């Protein structure tokens, strides 16, 4: 009887394990997201310099002293938010590597000039972040890493190009990245340059630099 019982136990199907419950954001994570959104909105509405900690706290629906439980100042909020945005952008840009080089140029142009940040307000927000990075060591390191990885992605495109106008892929990447940032900024300040025109200028220039058909 003992053996039969043991066999029956062995042969019986194992109980199905319950699927892990989907992870829910903690209250602290939700509040941090509200703080990031408030900072973002404040910068768009009045600029980073004129934004105060009280402004950010009000937009997030909390007191300034409560906000300081999560961040030790508006600089710390911007540093972390900018780092998060940079990681998200880089993941998207580096995912383009799965495609042929000429298509990567198009995807990069679409992302930069037609993507989620391509409105005049969002361009202004990013320019505010770049300006703040001049005097903030943490932001400067984050931006330098972002620039470096974007250029590295461009280098790979140029290395796979059929015929470079410039002999060096690194030099080509520097110029292409400068065009990308410069045109994005020009859209904000120059009414004669629309996002669509900037998109076309960047795409055609990089395609010519790579020897692709335009």
Image (spheres, rainbow, N blue to C red):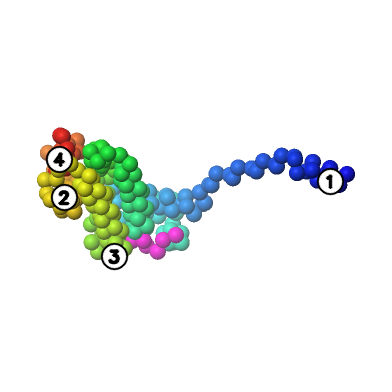
Residue assigned mark 4:
211
- x, y percent for residue 32: 43, 53
Q: Nearer the viewer, mark 3 or mark 2?
A: 2
The magenta stretch spans residue 74: yes
N-terminal of the pair, mark 4 or mark 3, is 3
Residue assigned mark 2:
172
Residue assigned mark 3:
137
Q: Which of marks 2 and 1 is in front?
A: 1
The tag on residue 27 is none
Residue assigned mark 1:
3
Q: Which of marks 1 and 3 is in front?
A: 1
Q: Can residue 202 be seen in this view?
A: no
Q: Is mark 3 on a helix, strand or loop?
A: helix
Marks 4 and 3: CB-CB under 8 Å? no
Q: What element carries label 2?
A: helix
Write down the region rendered in magenta.
70-76
How many angstroms separate mark 3 from mark 2 (CA)?
28 Å
- x, y percent for residue 67: 43, 58
Marks 1 and 3: CB-CB under 8 Å? no
- x, y percent for residue 140: 27, 61
The magenta stretch spans residue 21: no
Q: In this view, does 192 lie to the left or right of 37?
A: left
């Amino acid at each position: 009887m003992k053996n039969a019982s043991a066999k029956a136990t062995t042969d019986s199907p194992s109980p199905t394990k319950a699927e892990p419950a989907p992870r829910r954001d903690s209250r602290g994570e939700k509040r941090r997201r509200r703080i990031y959104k408030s900072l973002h909105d404040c910068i768009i509405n009045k600029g980073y310099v004129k934004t105060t900690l009280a402004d950010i706290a009000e937009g997030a629906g909390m007191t300034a002293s409560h906000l300081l439980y999560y961040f030790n100042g508006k600089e710390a909020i911007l540093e972390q938010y900018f780092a998060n945005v940079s990681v998200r952008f880089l993941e998207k840009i580096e995912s383009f590597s799965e495609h042929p080089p000429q298509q990567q140029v198009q995807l990069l142009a679409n992302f930069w000039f037609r993507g989620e940040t391509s409105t005049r307000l969002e361009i202004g927000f990013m320019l505010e972040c770049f300006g703040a990075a001049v005097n903030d060591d943490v932001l400067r390191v984050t931006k330098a890493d972002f620039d470096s990885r974007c250029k590295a992605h461009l280098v790979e495109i140029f290395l796979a190009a059929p015929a470079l106008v410039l002999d060096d892929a690194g030099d080509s990447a520097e110029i292409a990245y400068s065009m990308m940032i410069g045109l994005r900024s020009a859209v904000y300040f120059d009414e004669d340059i629309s996002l669509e025109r900037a998109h076309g200028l960047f795409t055609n220039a990089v395609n010519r630099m790579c020897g692709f058909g335009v």
